Every structure is written in structure tokens, then in C-alpha cells.
Image: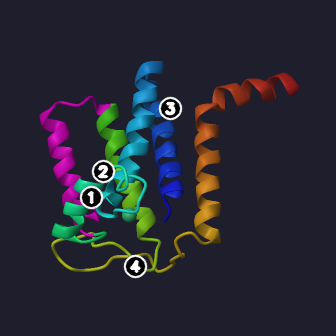
Amino acid sequence: MTGKTHASCGLLVGALTIEYFHTDLFTSVTVITLAIISSLIPDICHTQSKIGSRFKLISFFIRMIFGHRTFTHSLLFIVIIVCLLYIIQAPIYYLTTIILGLLSHVILDMLTPRGVKLFYPIPLSVRFPLVFKTGGLVDLSLASALAIGAIYVVFQPFFNNLLMNWL
Ligand SMILES: [Zn+2]
């Protein structure tokens, strides 16, 4: 999937997290930012990706050591991140948004023909029975649908008010 699709899904994850935890404005902005970053982080193994091009050196080494879509797209990686966040005692809403952001990335990549090495270091490519080409029509529509969903979740109280006034 393209960075746009991943970021849109991250946005939706962040929106749902702030909705669930009823966080204040400052925390909400942080939650959404963290969600978008963590939804892009697994592609750090890809130097041409949105996040990889920003951290070229780290990206280069991760790709050299692990290869593309292996370690950073695995359950092992997510478990390590969760342990680290647990050690630094990150608040539950940050923990949730980061885990969901990472998971959303892995799940979206499982919708592509190449799949992901979910059980790295076991070299098994995991993908859904139904896959879509990266940058294809489904990918682009998905990005838009996810972004619209996120905007709706964030502004839901506002939309509800608007509807109430109309009716
Ligand atoms: Zn990826």
C-alpha cells in the first residue's frame, strides 16, 4: 500500500483512540500524530518510502540487515515496541494508538500480493486471500475512504449538531 493509505489508516486509528479514551485537546493531537507515525514506521526498511526517505541512513541499515517487509512488519517487532513502551510506562492511550497504528500497517500490507513476513524470523509470507496492487485503484480508494472515516470520527459531535439543527 502507498504511504497515503497507511497514513490515512493511521489517522483513523488515532481518531478512534481519542474517541474511545475521551482525551483532552493536547493529548488528542499527540495521539493522532503518534498514530500516523507508527502507521508509517514499518516502511522504514524501504528507503523510498515516506518515512525511509526522511531517515535514509537508518533505513539503509535496517534494509541491509533484515530486508524489506520482514522484521519491521512482524509480530516480533510489535511485541518489542510494546515492551519498550511498557518499560517507559507510556500512558495507555499512547500505547493503544501506537500498537494499532503498527498493526494497521501490517494488516494493510497483507492485502498486497507480496504479503508480509508476519512471523519473522520464520520466512513465511502472510497475506489475505484477496490482494490489491499498491498504487492501484483500490489502494487509492482505500486511502480516501479511510481519511473520510477519520474526519467523520473526529468531527462526529459537530456533524450530529449540524444534523440536529437541520431536522
Ligand atoms: Zn509496509
Say which label, 3 or 2, has the lower sequence index. Answer: 3
**Residue labelled with disc 4:** 114
Question: Which numbered circle lies on residue 55?
Answer: 2
- Residue shown at the point (45%, 80%) measured from the top left: 113
**Rounded to the nearest whole Å, what is the CA distance between mark 4 and mark 1?**
20 Å
Disc 4 marks which amino acid?
Answer: Arg
- Residue shown at the point (29%, 62%) measured from the top left: 45
Q: Nearer the viewer, mark 1 or mark 3?
A: 1
Q: Position of residue 57 (x, y in %)?
A: 24, 55
Residue 24 visible in rendering: no
**Rounded to the nearest whole Å, what is the CA distance between mark 2 and mark 1?**
6 Å
Image: 104 above or below 33: below
- Residue shown at the point (50%, 51%) measured from the top left: 9
**Residue labelled with disc 3:** 19
Ligand 1 image position (quadrant):
bottom left
**Rounded to the nearest whole Å, what is the CA distance between mark 3 and mark 4?**
34 Å
Dot 4 and dot 2 residues touching (CB under 8 Å) = no
Say which label, 1 or 3, has the lower sequence index. Answer: 3
Question: Which numbered circle lies on residue 59?
Answer: 1
Q: Position of residue 59 (x, y in %)?
A: 27, 58
Disc 3 marks which amino acid?
Answer: Glu
Image: 66 above or below 52: below
